[in-house]
């Protein structure tokens, strides 16, 4: 049999106070002018009775439900980007909010259903997240629904949270420069087509710009470049194998993501070259496998958890519209060394 829900009136009766007085105490209202004994009696009664506040009823009174929606394409089922959800959950929990997570696989019909379900539950705002930073289609939202784009952009919703890819690109170059590299640096993965396609990536152009600007400021130029559309290990392997066959081996590689670097390691090994003794390597993303390469891969990480936390913070305190850029940490392992003389 279902048991009757304990109400605020039950708590007030047990504590010997009015419902309004019990409400003031349980809601933590300052200056209630009620005695410490009254506070103690109310909290003791609530604990003994197992009282839980009726969030739905509170939402009707305050027009707030302390609930956010999180709509993603593949974030929930992708280990690489699941930190976006983890960060959002942590920030929401710290603010006594809950997050309802819905994954759509990028299906527009499921996105419409997700929004309808969240609106029906009167969420206070919705986070739209993507596994890969890109421009995101967002179905029409009811007027007044707060929205934040996480690892994404949308022209109709200017509040967004993105990794600071430009600074990340500069950081990758800085690691090589600090190790003494100036000449013989090759760039693996830059693609003009990818940089122009905001639906594939809205941040890769910034990553490349940061790399190029840092090189130019140091008076350094690339010894070679290999353009790649798909950033997967097989393509990194083929690009570096072709590079080695076409001339002297580079002294350092900047790979546009870790998966390209995985392939680069294989090509270098097959050519009898060691990392970092013969060729230093730096890349981006901090894929979980980067730490398991031998030697460990130095990479500029995507700050997924910090991004998720910032998205919730922007719903809690919207501030001015625009981008929040989250710093990308340099994860230094063992793939960079001074160039061999």
Image: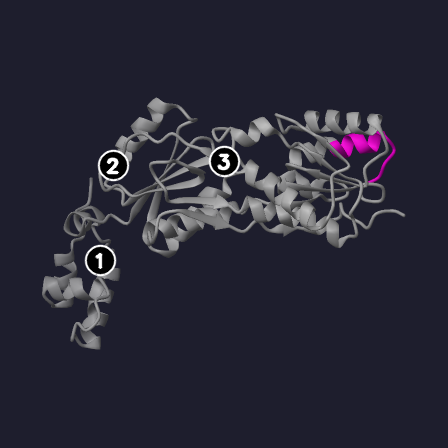
Q: Quadrant of the N terminus?
A: top left
Magenta residues (range): 264-274
> Is 76 in the magenta?
no
266 and 120: which one is in front? Answer: 266
Instruction: Report the magenta stretch's main SS.
Output: helix
Mark 3 — residue?
202
> Is 269 in the magenta?
yes
Identify the mark nearer the N-term, 1 or 3. Answer: 1
**Is 268 located above or below residue 68 in the figure?**
above
| Label drawn at residue 49 | 1
User: Could you say where residue 203 lies in the image, as x and y percent from the top left?
Assistant: 52, 38
To which quarter of the image does residue 41 belong?
bottom left
What count of labels does the image hold? 3
Give the foreground label among 2 and 1.
2
User: Could you say where residue 132 lies in the image, as x and y percent from the top left?
Assistant: 51, 34
Spatial separation of the CA atoms under disc 2 and disc 3: 28 Å
Give the foreground label among 1 and 3.
3
Whether residue 164 is visible to the viewer of this picture, yes or no, is: yes
Identify the mark nearer the N-term, 2 or 3. Answer: 2
User: Could you say where residue 10 lies in the image, as x and y percent from the top left?
Assistant: 14, 58
Whether residue 332 is visible to the viewer of this picture, yes or no, is: no
> Residue at coordinates 33% horizontally, 51% vertically from top-left?
318
Q: Disc 3 on helix, strand or loop? A: loop
Residue furthest out toward the left: 18
**Are there few (<14), some (14-19), or many (20+) residues within 10 Å of tag 3?**
many
| Label drawn at residue 119 | 2
Q: Is 265 on the left or on the right of 56, as rendered?
A: right
> Residue at coordinates 69% horizontally, 25% vertically from top-left?
235
Spatial separation of the CA atoms under disc 2 and disc 1: 32 Å
């Amino acid at each position: 049999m279902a048991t009757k829900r304990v109400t605020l009136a039950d708590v007030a009766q047990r504590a010997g106070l009015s419902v309004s007085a019990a409400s003031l105490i349980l809601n933590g209202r300052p200056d209630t002018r009620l005695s410490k004994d009254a506070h103690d009696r109310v909290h003791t009664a609530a604990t003994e009775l197992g009282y839980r506040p009726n969030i739905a009823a509170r939402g009707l009174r305050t027009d707030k439900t302390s609930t956010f929606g999180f709509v993603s394409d593949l974030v929930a089922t992708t280990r690489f980007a699941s930190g976006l959800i983890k960060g959002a959950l942590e920030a929401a929990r710290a603010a006594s909010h809950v997050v309802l997570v819905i994954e759509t696989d990028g299906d527009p019909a499921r996105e419409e259903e997700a929004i309808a379900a969240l609106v029906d539950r009167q969420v206070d705002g919705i986070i739209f997240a993507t596994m890969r930073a890109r421009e995101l289609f967002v179905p029409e939202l009811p007027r007044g629904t707060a929205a934040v784009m996480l690892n994404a952009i949308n022209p109709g919703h200017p509040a967004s949270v993105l990794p600071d890819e430009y600074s990340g690109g500069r950081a990758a170059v800085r690691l090589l420069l600090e190790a003494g590299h100036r000449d013989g640096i090759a760039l693996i993965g830059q693609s003009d087509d990818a940089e122009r396609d905001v639906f594939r990536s809205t941040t890769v152009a910034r990553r490349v710009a940061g790399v190029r600007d840092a090189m130019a400021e140091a008076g350094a130029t690339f010894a070679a470049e290999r353009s790649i559309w798909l950033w997967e290990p097989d393509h990194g392997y083929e690009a570096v194998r072709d590079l080695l066959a076409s001339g002297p081996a580079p002294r350092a590689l900047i790979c546009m993501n870790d998966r390209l670097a995985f392939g680069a390691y294989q090509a270098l090994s097959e050519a009898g070259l060691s990392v970092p003794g013969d060729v230093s390597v730096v890349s981006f993303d901090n894929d979980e496998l980067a730490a398991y390469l031998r030697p460990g891969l130095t990479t500029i990480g995507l700050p997924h958890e910090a991004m998720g936390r910032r998205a919730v913070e922007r719903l809690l305190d919207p501030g001015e519209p625009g981008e929040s850029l989250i710093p990308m940490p340099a994860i230094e392992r063992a793939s960079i060394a001074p160039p061999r003389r």
